[in-house]
Structure formats: structure tokens, C-alpha cells
Image (cartoon, grey):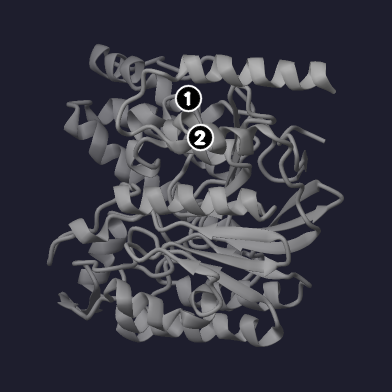
Amino acid sequence: MVKARRIFNTALLFWCCASLVTDAGAFLYETDPEVRRLVLKKQQGYPNASFIVFSDPHYFPPEFGTSGAAFEDYIRHDRKMIRESASIFKKALQDISMVAADFVLVCGDLTKDGEQESHRQVADLLQTLVDQGKQVIVVPGNHDVSNGMAMRYEGEEAEPVESVTPEMFRTIYRNCGFQDAIAQDPNSLSYISEPVPGLWVFAFDSCRYRENKPGEHSTTGGKFYDATLQWIEQMLIRALRENKAVIGCMHHGMVEHYPSNKKHFSDYLLDDFERIGKMCAAYGMRFVFTGHFHAQDITRKAWFSLVPNHVLVDIETGSLVTYPVPWRFVTIHNNRMSITTQQIQEIPEYGNAFLKYAYQFVLNGMTDIINEKLSSYGVPDTDQKLLTPQIAQAYVTHLKGDEIYRLPTFDFIGVSFTGILVGVVQGDLVRGWYRDLPPKDNNVFLNATTGSDD
């Protein structure tokens, strides 16, 4: 016992010495000896639980207009099935209602663009799950609060409608996490729920709606403002002291989901995600459930440190309005996590041909978006016809998850020098979409203590 204590104290002293030079932004686990002792001891295992995760439903009321020139112009620059969003959402809730689960996580972008009426309808529909006894835990997405593009459509006109303030969001979704919260951040919409005894769900508000401006698109990127970040760390410390297991739920990613993710799509990751993710993992948060990029992807990040099992698994769930139209069912039993993927198979508008329609819709939408981007790079139309299908297919492959890496990235036969140059420069993005970082993305068993494949 004496020898073990001596080894522990030596390790702790080594860590202290390594951290003597710190900046003002250092976390307490890096600077405070008492907090270090907390994170170095054996941490709490996960209680048994079952829950459902879905994300990015982008709900839009049909009565707000889903036809006409103005709406079609919006859809032309998008890849989401907004026209069908209400039908998809209702079918998802119907499917989910038939599954026994303790709680439901909704990882943001509940609405198309934060329309107040959209939020009210979403909350009413989620109430059906609450009435079943399933606790619902929602977080805002970048589209949801103080959005200057909240619109209704009629013919050639797009008419602004009321969005919601943070206070209104909290009120509308009072039965979806806020009312039963054991703690709420006074500086954001972040809160903590305990849907299962011994399990704290950190519902993170990672959105920058306070930076939004009237008549402009909402801010895509995510961050924790300083006061909120301090609150998060204090609550993680409290969780350790009270022997609570913790998971996170948020909109933006806390781990890169493919090589070059940060380089090409940094707005889909939390600002300073490397440092914050490392902090959350140090306090025992092994899993964070995210959305935003609309892909089915699970990625594990581990750090070499004295912290036991210093690992974070970011479980991103795709959008209900983007192929493959997924939701997840998660169980934790005997510290073993099972994650399975379910899909919306049909909606009234398309019957059992819905998945085929969804696949073609996103492929066509990305074709238009990629063509516009290649045009901005000066790539001629003849090259676009050869390159765009390859890029679009890589994107859709990543959306579905469990990608199989392929070489070469591009077939450049018949492509001009300009097209080849752009393809080479952007090639790391397409290669990244084909490279599946471990573990598997759709159906997987994980050790809840280590985050490793089980």
C-alpha cells in the first residue's frame, strides 16, 4: 500500500511539474492539485440505460408554403428535404414511440430556420413521447434561435416571420429537458438532466445565436463562451464528487470525423474542440452525441496522459431530412454500450420508395451545390460533368457511414489542367469522406469504460 501511494504521489508530482507553465485559459484539472486527484482516481461506471438519438429534423410547417418560386429557390441552394420535413418527423416519432427507452436525445436544428410556429409544433409533437414516459432532452442547433432567415413562402415572395429568443426556446421546450434539469447555466441554454439515476446528461448549448443579425443567415459555427465553459467544468467536477457518470449532447462536433474536417468544414466543429474535448474526457465524459453535419459517423479520440481511460467518442447522428434518414437506439448494460442505426423507411408521399427518393434528392442537391463551387474556381462545364458526380458520391457515402476507402480519389480521364489542379487541391476532402475513422458508424458495441470496440 505504501509503495502504491508513493508511485501515485510521484506521478502526481510529475504531472504538476509538467503543468507549472500554464496560461490564463488552463482548466482546473491542469492546475489544481485537488481536482487532479479527483480525475486520477478510478471513475464511475455507467448505469444501465436505454435511449434514442436523432438530430437535425429541420421541421417546417406545410402551411408556411412548400411550393412556388421563392421556396424552390431556397431548396435549390440546399440539400435538405424541407418539403417533406413534417411527414418525416411525424413518422420518426411514430417509430420511436414503439421502442421502449428511458429517454430521447435531440441534437439540435429542430426547425428549418427558427420559425416560432415551427418550434411550437415540434414541442407539441415531442410531447407525445413525454406523455409515454420517455424523457426528452433537446439542445438548440445553429438554425434554431434568433434566426434572421425565419420565413414563410407564397409564390415569388418570402415573408419574414417571428423567430425565438433564447428565453422563448427555454419556455417552449420546458417539458423537453429544461423543467426537469438539475442544473442550468445562467449564461446559455446549457443544462444538466438525470434521466436515469446516476447518469448526468450534459445538454450543451454550443450555438452562437447572440452573434446573429436580422435578415441574415444564422451563424453556422459553434463555441462555448467563457462563462459557460467555466460552468461546464465546475459541473463536471461536481459530477465526479457525487459519483455520477456523464455523457454529452450537443449540436457541433467535438472530434474531427474525417481527415481534413477542420481544414474544410471547421464551422461544423466546436471552436477549440481539441482542448475542450480533452477536458471533458479528463472528467470522465466518454461519449458525446452530436449532429450538424448530417452524417452517420462515430469517431474516437484518445489522449496519452495519466488520466485513466482518457478517451472521447463523438457519436454523430445524421439528419432526418437527409439520406440515410437515420436515428439511433443506444443501450448501456453492464458497462457495455450497444449502438444500432434505424432508418425511416416510408412516408405517405412516397410510400416504400422513400429511401430511394431521399438518396436521389441529396445526390441531385449536392450536384447543384458542387457545380456552383467548381464554377467559382473557374472549372469549365465539361470538367464539372466528370468531376461533380465523383465528389457528390463521396459525400453521400460519408453520410451513410462505414465508408470503404478507395484509391484513386478521382478519375481524371478527359479532365482539363484546371479541373485536375482543383481536384488535386481539394482531393484531401474527398479522400477524407471515404476514410472511415474507427470505430464503426452504424452498428457497434463499445466498452463504456474505455470507449474501445467491445
- Tell me the tag on residue 29: 2
Relative depth, front residue between 184 and 419: 184
Front label number (1 vs 2): 2
- Tell me the tag on residue 259: 1
Q: Quadrant of the N terminus?
A: top right
How packed is label 1: few (under 14 Cα within 10 Å), some, or many (20 or more)?
some
Dot 1 falls on a residue whose secondary structure is loop
Q: Amino acid at mark 2?
A: Tyr
Q: Position of residue 254 (x, y in %)?
A: 48, 40
Name which residue lies at 81% across and 16% down: 3
Up-down relation of residue 164 to residue 238 (above or below) = below
Up-down relation of residue 33 to residue 292 (above or below) = above
Q: Position of residue 369 (x, y in %)?
A: 31, 44
Q: Can the viewer see residue 397 in this picture?
A: no
Q: How far is mark 1 from mark 2, CA to CA?
A: 29 Å
Q: Quadrant of the C terminus?
A: top right
Up-down relation of residue 38 to residue 198 (above or below) = above
Residue that extends furthest to the front in the rendered view of this protein = 2
Q: Is residue 11 left or right of residue 189?
A: right
Q: Amino acid at mark 1?
A: Pro
Name which residue lies at 60% across and 53% down: 239
Relative depth, front residue between 7 and 160: 7
Dot 2 falls on a residue whose secondary structure is helix
Relative depth, front residue between 97 and 27: 27
